[in-house]
Image (tube, rainbow, N blue to C red):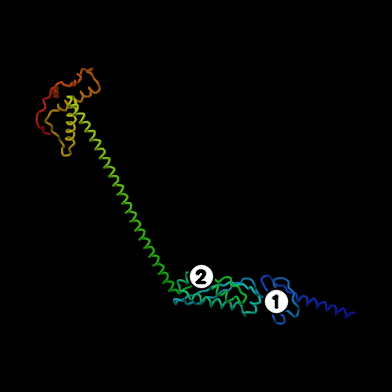
């Protein structure tokens, strides 16, 4: 019985070992290939999997997470024979673990060489200016080319990015001078355009000012002409009224007219700029007499009937002969001399 017990125990242990050897746990983010007698049969997904012990074995452990591949710096000659240094970074993911395991040897090295080769090919077909200004276009072209080349390996290239493009130092200095000259040229153009616009605005302002000034002069001339017309009408009306009064024999109107003109003449003589002293060897009785005539007119207009001792001014009736004008000399003063008077 002792030997039987030992045999049973050995069989149970072997069975347990065989069972455990057939159970495989695949971690998340990985895929295991299964080989039966050296031939690929299937791929184990993450989780608990069972294989046939001693017949099947795990072939390759493939990382199916997205991975990054650093592309080292390399020299690239552009289409216009400019030498630049460029480095990049590539992101890829395994979509088919079996193809990635059995279609290519050393997957990372293959992807590295493939990306470097296509970088030289794509960047070498472009000019330097186009190379420096169209980095997005370079990334798109590299992504399409490398992804198409890596598709048979079960690889998906998700991104290819150019990290840096470094031209030679002398070329950088030349580009700096070119950029400075271009900016100075744009500054000169903008300054010239600003000066031209300022001159145009000043000319338009002067034009508008001249138009407004001419319109102002036209309006002023029109108003002056209208004022002169009104003044002429007033003078004509006054003259007509005076002529009517004279024709009717109204001596007060004549005295008023003579006094007004006499006073205006004296005012013009006194205000002459070339006369500082005025010598008048004449008596002012004429002016006083004229003022007396003005007072008589005022009495007649306001209806004063001699309440203060003054005699009302008489009017000539139609058919009556005109009266002789009385002397306008003031008592105590000599009569005004006849002829011209020296001023």
Whichever of labels 2 and 1 marks the residue nearer the N terminus, that label is: 1
Front one among 14 and 242:
242
Please indicate whether residue 127 sits to the left or right of residue 88 in the image: left
Picture coordinates of residue 15, whole percent (x, y): 80, 77
Label 2 residue SS: helix
Quadrant for the C terminus, please.
top left
| Residue lying farthest to the front in this orientation | 319
Which residue sits at x=37%, y=63%?
Answer: 189
Q: Callout 2 environment at 10 Å: few (<14), some (14 to 19), or many (20+)?
A: few
Which residue sits at x=83%, y=79%?
Answer: 11
Q: Measured along the vertical axis of the image, is residue 256 above or below residue 4?
A: above
Which residue sits at x=17%, y=22%?
Answer: 318
- Residue 261 sits in quarter: top left
Picture coordinates of residue 179, whole percent (x, y): 41, 68
Q: Measured along the vertical axis of the image, is residue 242 above or below residue 147?
A: above
Q: How many marks?
A: 2
Please indicate whether residue 39 sits to the left or right of residue 261 in the image: right
Separation (CA) of disc 2 from disc 1 = 40 Å
Please indicate whether residue 91 sits to the left or right of residue 191 in the image: right
Which label number is shown at residue 137? 2
Q: Measured along the vertical axis of the image, is residue 248 above or below residue 149?
A: above
- Residue 333 sits in quarter: top left
The residue that label 1 is drawn on is 42
Please indicate whether residue 73 sits to the left or right of residue 182 in the image: right
Picture coordinates of residue 29, whole percent (x, y): 66, 71
Picture coordinates of residue 32, whole percent (x, y): 69, 75
- Residue 161 sits in quarter: bottom right
Q: Measured along the vertical axis of the image, is residue 233 above or below residue 327?
A: below
């Amino acid at each position: 019985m002792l030997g039987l017990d030992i045999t049973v125990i050995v069989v149970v242990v072997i069975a347990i070992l065989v069972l455990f050897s057939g159970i495989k746990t695949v971690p998340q983010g990985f895929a295991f290939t299964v080989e039966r007698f050296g031939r690929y049969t299937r791929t184990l997904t993450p989780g608990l999997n069972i294989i046939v012990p001693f017949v099947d074995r795990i072939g390759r452990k493939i990382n199916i997470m997205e991975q990054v591949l650093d592309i080292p710096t390399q020299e690239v000659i552009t289409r216009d024979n400019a030498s630049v240094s460029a480095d990049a970074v590539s992101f890829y993911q395994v979509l088919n673990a079996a193809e990635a395991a059995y279609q290519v040897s050393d997957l990372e090295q293959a992807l590295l060489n493939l990306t470097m080769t296509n970088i030289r090919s794509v960047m070498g077909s472009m000019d330097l200016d186009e190379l420096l200004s169209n980095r997005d276009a370079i990334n798109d072209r590299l992504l399409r080319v490398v992804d198409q080349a890596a598709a048979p390996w079960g690889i998906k290239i998700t991104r290819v990015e150019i990290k840096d493009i470094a031209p030679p130092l002398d070329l950088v200095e030349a580009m700096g001078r070119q950029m400075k000259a271009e900016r100075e040229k744009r500054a000169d153009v903008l300054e010239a355009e600003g000066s031209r616009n300022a001159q145009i605005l000043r000319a338009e302002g002067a034009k508008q000012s001249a138009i407004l000034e001419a319109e102002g002069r036209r309006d002023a001339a029109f108003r002056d002409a209208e004022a002169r017309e009104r003044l002429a009408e007033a003078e004509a009306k006054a003259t007509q009224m005076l002529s009517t009064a004279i024709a009717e024999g109204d001596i007060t109107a004549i005295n008023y007219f003579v006094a007004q003109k006499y006073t205006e003449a004296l005012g013009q003589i006194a205000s002459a700029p070339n006369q500082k002293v005025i010598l008048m060897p004449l008596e002012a009785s004429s002016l006083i007499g004229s003022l007396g005539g003005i007072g008589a007119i005022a009495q007649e207009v306001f209806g004063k009937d001699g309440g203060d001792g003054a005699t009302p001014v008489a009017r000539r009736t139609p058919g009556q002969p005109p009266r002789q004008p009385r002397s306008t000399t003031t008592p105590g003063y000599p009569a005004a001399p006849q002829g011209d008077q020296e001023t």
